[in-house]
Amino acid sequence: MGVTKTDLFTKEQNELAVLAKALAHPARIAILQYLLASSKCINGDLVNELGLAQATISQHLRELKNIGLIQGSIEGVSMSYCINPEKWSNVQKLFNDMFDKIQRFDPDDCC
């Protein structure tokens, strides 16, 4: 999506697109699932858990942190990450608002 075209869409549509793009990689989904299950982790745990290279995991963590889905801190050589509950709730609401529109959809009106 070109930078000049995003103004054709609502704020919510653009936000959903950015979130969907960030979620569109299985490694990121695995990272989120791991963080949700453990509530916190140290970066090294992800290397052992997912079997991906440290550099690859760091790139995925950076993407998730850039959109605010996760938050983290650096303590020495260890980086701890967890789900950002406020952003997570916002993401859930955005997707639920879109998915809930199916309740107003009449399948008999579809071609």
Image (cartoon, rainbow, N blue to C red):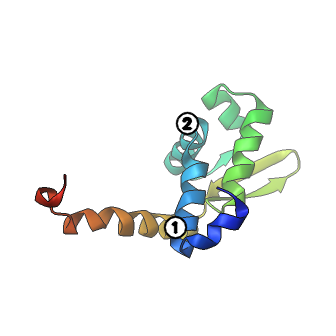
Question: Label 2 amino acid?
Answer: Pro
Label 2 sits on a secondary structure element that is helix
Residue carrying label 1: 13
For residue 43, above or below residue 15: above
**Horizontal and vertical percent position of residue 52:** 69, 27
Q: Which residue appears farthest toward the front when viewing the image?
A: 111
Q: Residues within 10 Å of mark 1 (few under 14, many from 20)?
A: some
Residue 8 picture quarter: bottom right
User: Is residue 30 toward the left or the right of residue 71 in the image?
Assistant: left
For residue 51, above or below residue 19: above
**Horizontal and vertical percent position of residue 89:** 48, 68
Residue carrying label 2: 26
Residue 71 picture quarter: bottom right
Question: Label 1 amino acid?
Answer: Gln
User: Is residue 102 toward the left or the right of residue 45 in the image?
Assistant: left
- Of 89 and 49, nearer the camera is 89
For residue 56, above or below residue 17: above
Q: Which residue appears farthest toward the top when viewing the image?
A: 51
Q: Earlier in the sequence, mark 1 or mark 2?
A: 1
Residue at (20, 64) in percent of width and height: 105
**Horizontal and vertical percent position of residue 32:** 56, 47
